[in-house]
Image (cartoon, coloured by chain):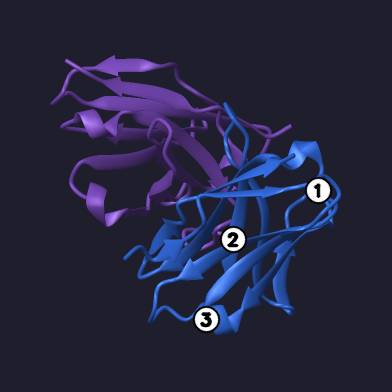
Amino acid sequence: QVQLVQSGAELKRPGASVKVSCKASGYTFATFGISWVRQAPGQGLEWMGWTSTSNGDTNYAQNLQGRVTMTTDTSTTTAYMELRSLRSDDTAVYYCARARDGYNGGIWDYWGQGTLVTVSS
Amino acid sequence: QAVLTQPASLSASPGASASLTCTLRSGVNVDFYRVYWYQQKPGSPPQYLLRYKSDSDNQQGSGVPSRFSGSKDASANAGILLISGLQSEDEADYYCLIWHSGAWVFGGGTKLTVL
């Protein structure tokens, strides 16, 4: 069965970086891209970006450009999202999701369990 | 003004129908967009429900009951998620989503209470 398993919770200081992993299994990894979505405590969903798992193409949300990098490792079927220069308002649960139809397809049919990133001094 | 606006909350009775709206900002014409809908229950990731652009361009998520359906109200410039035969398990947050200006945009979400 398709599974996306994310890395564990992180506590970071302001200004630090965090790298969240998303291990995929149960399907051919390079067939579907990965989108990342975050959710601040008690708030709504925010799309962060998308990465291809076949050629490394990426598409990032404009407000995160320059601070976020999304990568994949096909040898381990793992996607990564790195966010730098962390601020308190980056505190959120970060989700990865399988993007069924490419960067401009909004069907994200399988999701990771979420990774809580807390930014606090 | 946000691109997508959803009412913060909605209440409905079991067995009734609920119509959740997602209003697009003036100048962003709903006719041109595929509107996606996601359901999120507390402590869980979102789940894809369906996509609707028109009666000939729509897609139901795998395993999503047919009592969840999509439509549009062109006069209100809104996408609509209709849930019929409400059940207690439908109590959740619902988010709409569109692809706009090269990025994915979520609505703020509607908390549906079934009571």
Spatial separation of the CA atoms under disc 2 and disc 1: 20 Å
Q: Nearer the viewer, residue B50 or B110?
A: B110
The answer to whether tags 3 and 1 share a subunit is yes
Question: What shade does chain A have?
Answer: purple
The answer to whether tags 2 and 1 share a subunit is yes
**Left or right of A47 in this view: B15:** right
Q: Position of residue B65 (x, y in %)?
A: 83, 51
**Left or right of A77 in this view: A38:** left
Is B62 placed above or below B57 here? above
User: Residue A88's image quarter?
Assistant: top left
Which residue is at 20% across, 41% downward?
A67
Q: Which chain is blue in the rendering?
A: B
Earlier sequence position, callout 3 versus callout 1: 3
Give neighbour class at mark 2: few <14, some 14-19, many 20+ (Cα, 10 Å).
many
Question: Which mark identifies residue B32?
Answer: 3
Q: Which residue is mark 1?
A: B86
Is B20 placed above or below A85 here? below
Q: Quadrant of the C terminus of chain A?
A: top left
Q: Position of residue A109 (x, y in %)?
A: 64, 46
Dot 3: what SS? helix
Question: Which mark identifies residue B36?
Answer: 2
